[in-house]
Amino acid sequence: MSEEREPEETSHGHGHGHGHGHGHGLTPDADSRYLGGALALILVYMTGEVVIGLLARSLALISDAAHMMTDAFAIALALVAMRIAARPPKGGYTYGLRRAEILSAQLNGLTLILLSVFFVYEGVRRLLDPPDVEGQLVFWTSIAGIAVNIAATWLISRANRSSLNVEGAFQHILNDLYAFISTAVAGLLVWTVGFARADAIASLVVAALMLKAGYELLRDAGRVLMEAAPAGIDPSELGGRLARRPCVEEVHDLHVWEVSSGYPALSAHVLVDAMGDCHAVRRDLQTLLRDSYGITHTTLEVDHVDATAPSPGDHGHCQDAHGPRHVAGAQPHRHAGGHPCDH
């Protein structure tokens, strides 16, 4: 019996029917409105904070203002990246420009880390030689900053945070909220008890928060750029499940990755029992991938095993597997016996 090959099957989707999708059914236009509202709030407040920070000689306020500047930059970058990523595939960009969002997230993360290094340096310098700080100005400005950041955080939380692009902007705003709380405490201490070093300590707290958020963004965006498996998906476990489906003898050349955040994809070569129905097997595997893993963009090349050579199980008819399989690393995932399938 000659080898029968089914045509490559590709189903396109964005994974919105699972945990990586829009949890509340938002559209990109709605996301843009929420981000735009947060951007307007931040720009207005940031301008006033720079002036007051200079008047009060407060490093904590100036660091907060710089953080808000990166917030504004992050949101503006997110808005631009959303527009770019929404463009349809064209020319050589067969996936479109979806990874513009990932590049935006990486730039946001890098910005946070670089700023944290600067504020650690300035904070340590001011701990050794604390300047006079107008604690009352710092306190009341920080209280206003908390209110602005709560509003901005709420707006961005309404957008689709499954996107690393939006999540990057959200982390900027959320960390700025924590920073304003620490700055308000520092201003109160300077104002009430004259503890001038509290301002420098608050700036170090801000720097630590920025460093943590920046590292997490770089890590998550780096996984996408390096085409690692999506978080929460074990390729060995997934391959084993595919190989245990009825009529499947072996699964190899298995690759699973993310085109962009919330857009997982998979490709594999599947060998089917000589008496199996390749079309039925392909549909069964696609259903499993969609329902169990949220993977709707799949490329499955499905072939019959060579009837002249012994198959891994050599059963003579399709069977559902229950026995052990080799599922380590990039090795083939093989069938091991079970019940016949319909074809």
Image (cartoon, rainbow, N blue to C red):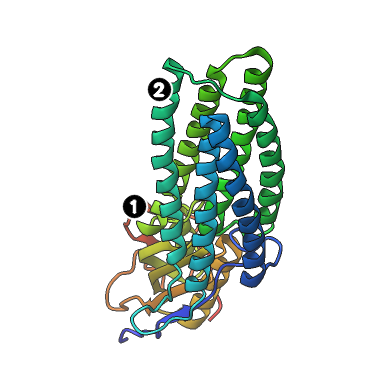
Which picture quadrant has residue 256? bottom left
In the foreground, 110 or 197: 197
x, y percent for residue 74: 51, 55
Mark 1: give few (<14), some (14-19) or many (20+) Cα within 10 Å. few
Residue 238 image point, x, y percent: 47, 58
Within the image, what quadrant is residue 113 found in?
Answer: top left
Residue 49: image x %, image y %? 60, 42
Q: Residue at position x 53%, y 35% from top? A: 54
Eye-nearest disc, 2 or 1 = 2
Gap in angstroms between the C-alphas marked 2 and 1: 50 Å
Question: Looking at the picture, which amino acid does disc 2 mark?
Answer: Arg
Give the residue pinned by disc 1: 329
| Mark 1 secondary-structure assignment | loop
In the rendered image, the residue lying farthest to the left is: 309
| Front residue of this view, candidates 253 and 231 | 231
Residue at the (63%, 24%) spot, across then down? 135
Name the foreground residue: 279 vs 32: 32
* 159 left or right of 228 in image: right
Residue 128 visible to an observer of this rendering: yes
Instruction: Say which residue appears at 66% left-offset and 41% top-offset.
Output: 145
Instruction: Identify the disc placed on residue 125.
Output: 2
Callout 2: helix, strand or loop? Answer: helix
Quick check: 138 left or right of 283? right
